[in-house]
Image (cartoon, rainbow, N blue to C red):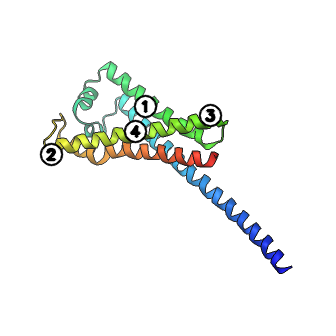
Amino acid sequence: MLSSMSARHLGRSALITNEKAGRVMIQSKRIYICAGFIWCLLFAIMSFYWAGGGMIGVKTLGGFIYHQAIEREASFIAMVWFTGFVKLCGGLFLLLLLRRWSSITNRILYFLALLAGILLFIYGLANVVSLICAGLGLLFLQIDDFAFKWRLYFWEPFWMVGGALFILAAFKFKREVK
């Protein structure tokens, strides 16, 4: 009788543990998705601010981008508006990972999120490598020291963080929908 009760207790205990593990996994998935959404939203807001004529922080980008922002050339401003909407759409895309869809849709969402994350990360990493090469005198970039430091220590790692958030959200999404 005692062993039968123990077995039932252990079975119920394992079920509770599995439920808790499932909730923790879902919550960690939500953390990556929500953090990625916030990353996209912040990035989009910055683009909208700059496209609307705001100048705070533009000097940190340096080079061609800084000069185009000062000149307010129409095609450049249109491109900044467009990139803001792309960033916003990226955040909204991540929110799709909060629920389960059909099997094929789940696969498509997983691969798109993973691909976006890889591309964002590689973009940031390639720029970091370019900046390091420029810092070593192997490459010439038309940016001042102020923008150089901002891009090396903030902007390019910021792209990499966004990529990592997309990748982690994709992996957690795939694990949950299995």
Specify few, some or many for label 2: CA neighbours under 10 Å numbering under 14, 14-19, or 20 or more: few
Query: Disc 4 on helix, strand or loop?
Result: helix
Query: Disc 1 on helix, strand or loop?
Result: helix
**Residue 136 has which mark?**
2
**Image position of 26 with respect to 110: above or below:** below
The residue that label 3 is drawn on is 105
Kindly identify the residue that appears in the image at 18 percent across and 35 percent down: 141
Judged left or right of residue 122, residue 71 is left
Amino acid identity at mark 3? Thr
Kindly identify the residue that appears in the image at 65 percent across and 56 percent down: 22
Q: Nearer the viewer, residue 24 or 76?
A: 24
Q: Nearer the viewer, mark 4 or mark 3?
A: 3
Q: Are marks 2 and 4 in contact (CB under 8 Å)?
A: no
Amino acid identity at mark 2? Leu
- Residue 16: image quadrant is bottom right
**Residue 121 has which mark?**
none
**Residue 120 has which mark?**
4
Q: Nearer the viewer, residue 32 or 42?
A: 32
